[in-house]
Image (cartoon, grey):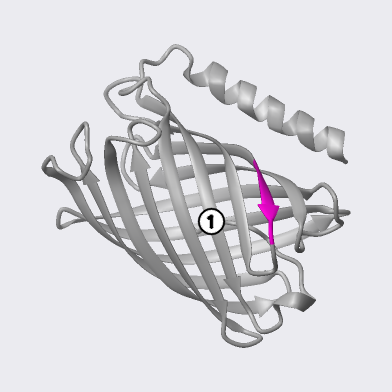
Amino acid sequence: MKPNFLKAIIFMMAFHLTLTASVQAQNNKTGGWYITNLSLTLDKKFSLWLETQTRAQNLTKDFFYHEFKGGIAYKLADKVTVLLGIGDYKTYTFPGNFKTPMAVKETRLWQQLVMSNNINRLKLEHRYRIEQRWLNGEFNQRFRYRFNPILPLNHKSVVAKTVYLTAFDELFFTNLAPYFMRNRFFAGAGYQFTPVVGAQIGWIRQFDYRKNDDGTGKNFIQASLLFTLDKKIFEREHFPSTMD
């Protein structure tokens, strides 16, 4: 299972690099993408989620984007969860640092369905999302699908002191031309320090498609801190994942 999973990640990375190699990015330098995520389990069915993000044109400077969002999730079945979320998103004009004029102010609502399953120790998550977005006061809709496999390396599941590999590919669609809006691919690794605290780091490629040209893409290094608060936390495995 491990060799097949690694081959799949390598293939997906090669595909994305080949697809966008001929496109001139808005900023060729690798950016920084930083996430803090908190999940709080209330009971057997309900949980709360909070997440903050900030993104930079370079690894540690020219910050141009930040967001704060949260949601409430309900467990329909053992491996099926629905979530209702709301968030505030702000994008600043180049180069950023939250000093230049704001380019986009967005308020977003979304509804989400997550289904997961296991193939031996390989964990698979399928996430479907419908978003209602107000960008500078104008309304539009977006639809997303994310496929996220996780492979624990030194344990059969993600528990304390587990090293794991993770990757995801997410497709973004709208109800307006060109319909296929964005592709986001991530490959990386994580470590679950304790039942409460985990960390994850990797490479993410985001490519935006546009109607009138070839679109633009950018590479980021993404680093995440993941906190899980759950009275039953010592009795269950983790599925380390960000909201966005």
Q: Is residue 229 above or below residue 197?
A: below
Q: Secondary structure at mark 1?
A: strand
| Marker count (numbered) | 1
Residue occupying image coordinates x 46% and y 53%: 35
Image height check: is 193 above or below 78? Answer: above
Q: Position of residue 6 (x, y in %)?
A: 77, 33
Residue 209: image x %, image y %?
37, 30
Residue furthest out toward the top:
22
Residue at 41%, 37% in the rendered image: 32
Q: Which residue is depicted at the point 56% across and 66% down?
A: 227
In the rendering, at what x and y percent does residue 47 appear?
Answer: 55, 79
Identify which residue, 70 or 196, lies in the foreground: 196
Q: Is residue 192 magenta?
A: yes
- Quadrant assignment, res 213: top left
193 versus 231 height, above or below: above
Give the extent of the magenta segment: 189-193
The residue beneath circle 1 is 225
The quadrant in which the N terminus is found is: top right
Q: Amino acid at mark 1?
A: Leu
- Which residue is painted at 32% across and 23% down in the image? 27
